[in-house]
Each structure stands twice: as structure tokens, then as C-alpha cells.
Image (spheres, rainbow, N blue to C red):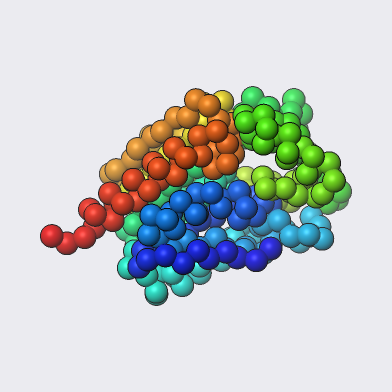
Amino acid sequence: MRPVTLAGGENAVLLIHGLQSSPAELLPLAKRLQQAGYTVHLPHIAGYGYEHGDTPRSVTRWQDWHAKALQEFRALQQQYKTVCVGGLCIGGTLSLSIAAELGDEVTALTLLSTTLWYDGWAMPWYRPFRYLGYVWPIRYWYTYKEREPFGLKNEQLRRWVAREMAHKDASMVGASRLNLPAIQEAERMIAVVKKSMSRITAPAIVIHAVEDEVASPRSARYIAEHIGSQTVESVMLHNSYHMITVDNERDQVAADTIRFFDHARAQRTPG
């Protein structure tokens, strides 16, 4: 997968897609941000995102993901007046991870379906036993197969994704299978991020679906209650599942993010 940059104005946004996924799931939001005047960068993080031909042994440590995301932020910071950060699912968790280190250098955060617990209503019954699978060598041969509803309440989109998943190893919502090393590294990062919440000072908007089938609203509530930011806004969606950037309320997600980013930038502008 290649990184994507949508050129706009002098204010930038770093958007981080979900685990073993690609920028495709964030493109609707990225295009709206570009139309609003932002330059938007969606990086490729090796060992984190989807790459055709990758194996479980291709997964890198979460610290490597953090370092790459931080590097991408610094590169934008060198070129643009302000830099906002956002992410979907584990991309939201990774956004929190770098925000804890960067402090007020981050202009604002948009945290989309951010996952701190895998406790949504569609999680398989054997989910609590996944820790047994982290034991070598099981972790290298077992994969979790994505299944309906694929994070989508929109039935037309869901049917399209189902057809894609049946014939390909990925779709607009990510890889057709998630491997255990990736999930294990994500959970290691989650544990650290939970302990770092008070260090995050950037204004944050937390957008989450009430019916998120991957991560229940518990994750959103935890962020709102524990983040160190003085300005926190929570938005709960009632007609979407996990993939809120492409599902029924994607326009609201974009509008709320743009409004919040614009306000955060205005608050930082002298005079």
C-alpha cells in the first residue's frame, strides 16, 4: 500500500487507518477535509497496515507503529502551520499514543470508533480465549476471519464488501483476515495508552456508534472520562456500526470533525 496525500492549504491533518487496513476506509473523510482547506496525509505504516503477501511474521511491534506515526507527524509539522491528528479503530488508539507524547503540539484530535476493548456485540464467543492463541507457534498460523456485518449498517455497502471479501484478501474496510500477532501488538499498545490518557492535552472529539459491533461505547466513555484534554466533545451515532467513516453517517462524521478542527485552530490563533 502507498501513502496518500491530498493537497490543500497550510493546515494539515494526519489520518491513521485501522489495523491491517488501508487508507481507503478514510478517503471519504480525507476528501471532505481537503474540500474544507486542509492538506490530508494518510501514511503507510509497514507491519501495521494491509499489504498483499504479508504474513503474520510481517507484523512489527507497536512501538514501531508509534515511531512511524510520530515521524509522519514531525514531517507535517515542518511544512504546515498546524497539524491535527485522527484515526479509526486502532488508528484512533495509535493517535492517542502519539498525542500522549506530543502534548500541545497536536492542534486537535478526532477519535473515530477508537478501540480500547474488543467488546462489541459481534465479537465471537471464543474471544476471551484469544490469549491462548498468543502462545508460539499458534499465533503464526491462526487468523481471525472478518465476517458480516463488516462494520457496516448500510446493507448495500455490506453486500458489496461481502462480494469483495469472497474473491479478494482485502476490501475498503480492510483485510479479510486478521492475524494474532497484529491483534496482540494492538492490545499491548492499548494497555499503555490507557495508562497515558492523562498526558493527552490536545482538544479531542470522540465519535462512536452506539451499535459498534467491534468496540462498544465503553471505549468512548473511557476516553472522555480519562483524557487530560480540557476540551472534549463526545458524539454518539445511532445509524452506523464500526466503520463510521464509510457507513450511513459518514457525512456527519466529516462535518463534526471539520467543525471541531476549525474551532481548535481558531482557539490557537493569536488575537
From the top left corner, tell me how far across and down residue 48 is, in percent: 66, 57
Q: Is residue 122 above or below residue 165?
A: above
**Image point (21%, 60%), residue name:** 269
Q: Is residue 186 above or below residue 269?
A: above
From the top left corner, tell me how far across and down residue 52 is, in percent: 78, 59
Who is closer to the viewer here, 151 or 222? 151
Q: Is residue 181 above or below residue 11?
A: above
Q: Residue furthest left?
A: 271
Image side of residue 166 versus residue 205, left or right:
right
**Image point (28%, 56%), residue name:** 265
The quarter of the displayed image where residue 204 is located: top left
**Image point (34%, 57%), residue name:** 107
Can residue 246 be seen by looking at this rendering? Answer: yes
Image side of residue 199 versus residue 71, left or right:
left
Image side of residue 29 versus residue 25, left or right:
left
Who is closer to the viewer here, 241 or 133? 241
From the top left corner, tell me how far across and down residue 271 is, in percent: 13, 60
**Image point (69%, 63%), residue name:** 1
From the top left corner, tell me how far across and down residue 38 is, in percent: 40, 60
